[in-house]
Amino acid sequence: MEAIILQILNGLDKGSAYALIALGLTLIFGTLGVVNFAHGALFMIGAFCAVTLSRILTLSHTIVDETRTDFLGNPLKVEVPYVHDIFGVSTGDVIIDWAVPLSILFAIPVMIAIGIIMERGLIKHFYKRPHADQILVTFGLAIVLQEIIKYYFGANPIPTPAPDAFKGSFDFGQALGFDPNLIIYPYWRIVYFAFAMIIIGAVFAFLQFTTFGMVVRAGMADRETVQLLGINIDRRFTLMFGMAAAVAGLAGVMYTPINSPNYHMGMDFLVLSFVVVVVGGMGSLPGAVLAGFLLGVLESFASMREVLAVLPGLNQIIIYLVAIVILLTRPRGLMGRKGVMEE
Amino acid sequence: MFGLEKKDWNLLLFVAALVALAPFILNPFPENSAMAQFNAGYPDLMQRFVIFGIFAIGFNILFGLTGYLSFGHAAFLGVGSYAAIWMMKLLTMNVIPAIILSVIVAGIFSVLVGYVTLRRSGIYFSILTLAFAQMSYSLAYSVLTPITGGETGLQPKVSDPRILDGAIADGTIPKANLFGLEMGASFDLSIAGWVFTFNAGYYIAAIVMLASFYLAIRIFRSPFGLMMRAVKSNQQRMNYTGLNTKPYTLAAFVISGMYAGLAGGLMVAMDTQAGPERMFWTASGEVVLMTILGGAGTLIGPVLGAGVIKYMENILSKINSDILHGWFAFMPDGMEDFTVAILYPFIGKGWHLTLGILFMLVVIFLPGGLVEGGQRIRALFGRGKAEDKPSTEPAE
């Protein structure tokens, strides 16, 4: 029992990342009909937004501290972050400590801007081209974005820690009445899961309960009719692209403490996220979220020692295996709608 | 001649001449000159040109003719490599059985994969092939270690049985050979500062490449090729006329998988090792880049694309900032630094950036690839019209 709970918990954080990326992919596909291979790169850029902000916050200048001396007897040179000068030492330290959560505020405008520039500058010209061309051009864009990040941040992973308040683990088992230390779960992963749920909830609420969302949903169902009603649906779809980029970016920002960001993390996630989208059903938002969590949890179950003893290597291939089976038995995916992407 | 029209025959002869004279063409600069680093005429790279040429020709038979975009083609290359290296370990270091087995094994594997993946089309097909390739990669990397050597891959060892080769007297690992002619054997011709290397392995690979190119021309011009183009332009209509397109697409898939296996086998023949990284999805992406860059659906395009990408990978990536400073030394100091700073991200380790930008530009402005670019330039100068080269028209 406790092993099962532990695996479900372990699967949730990865599943959250899959679900968020797949949600963005589906938003773009459902609104604009574009298969965006650069979506993983957006996830990665989000993660590097967090890196950038924490670097900005720790920008420092050197002062000479007369009260202390180094081992040669000279006055000690101390690096002082500018944040200390502005907010005082204690507040400054808190700000630096909370760099990753603060990056959310920084990442939202940046990601929306990147998304809109991408859509207006490049993807707009590909609506009438075949899907293969869309895949190819966004694939090229992903390479370019990835290489730019690699040029500025280097090829090595950059550790970006979570705030001190979230370090350590929560004894989940004890809370549920099991023995202590059986089910322990890092706090940050709980935060990540909760964050993912909030974002997913926000996106659904936005689409369901606002007029803007209603128009977008109408546009997804029948673009032409909405246009005939005198609504500029293209502008709204562009904004949705920005929003999808922001969702991917935020997923990346919050993922940095779990996995140190490197320039190819986006591609690693993208391949899996595509599988997630296909399993969930192309164009179905709830399907994408469901499949994301489902595959995350399945992957974590497949990496249990007991399972690996019977079927070695299953954890490496389980997602692809599930995708193949689903595509062959339920061609539209778990929750795919009729008439989407069918030849 | 040989069942080819005159224009196709000319194209084949042109490619043959290009390939045969490659050691001269790729070494235009004297050995000790400053430009010598742009020489691509060393055996290792020339072999890669033709081998990836074969890979791309094969990929083009699938993508260029039927329009099915496979994102997992490197799996067949990897499987072919493993088959070839096992042949070398068990039977003989002669490359012929190794290459034959690699083609057969890749063919069988592609029948299996194709049978499943071709049940879907479009983006689903791309993702299914990607899933299969990633699965093969993961398995080769982990569970199948006894067969694949896991992370380290496979190399021939002294202790291997090698039934046909007999005992080796001096205990060294024999080199891959063709009836005694070693793949690494080369002959240097030096003429007044120029050094041209003629490598046995390169010419063997080149002959195989010409044979595959000939076969590709025949496929493109056959009724079978025409049928596949029909599948590309409107599969539904083909189905409505009562024709089952599945055998045609599967045949294209298997042929293209066998080409990939052939390339994998040749890779092992030239450099006797195999590892799982050959199956990684970036390797599959590379062949897509090559084909699109050169021109999908054209005969010469994929070969051209493979050449351009491999040239960039090996030559562009070697340029470092010192060399750049050397080139722009004639400029005033500030301007020199500025120019170097602008150019630096695009060369050396950043060559992927150049590749990505080039690829995007081609997809956006030249959907027909470099071949279409060439045709447009020809049309611009008015002399040769596009009709001069029907063999290079896209298959659409």
Image (cartoon, rainbow, N blue to C red):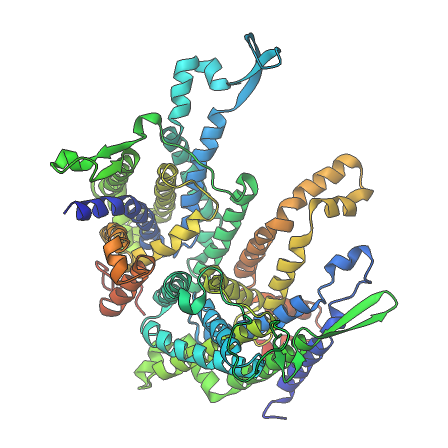
Do we see residue B69 in this rendering? no
Name the one closer to the observer, A322 or A178: A178
Instruction: Work out whether A209 lies above or below B37.
Output: above
- Picture quadrant where residue A168 is located: top left
- For residue A98, say whether it is visible: yes
Hey, which residue is sitting farthest front in the picture? B169
Rendering coords of residue A145 (x, y %) = 50, 47
Q: Is residue B266 above or below residue A285?
A: below
Relative depth, front residue between A10 and B231:
A10
- At 15% from the left and 33% from the top, the residue drawn is A175
Task: Give the image location of residue A172, x and y in percent.
Answer: 19, 36
Would you identify the image quadrant in which residue B344 lies? top right
Residue at coordinates 57% horizontally, 51% vertically from top-left? B353
Q: Residue furthest left?
A: A177
Please tell me in which quadrant of the rendered image residue A318 appears.
bottom left
Q: Which residue is drawn at 73% across and 44% down?
A: B322
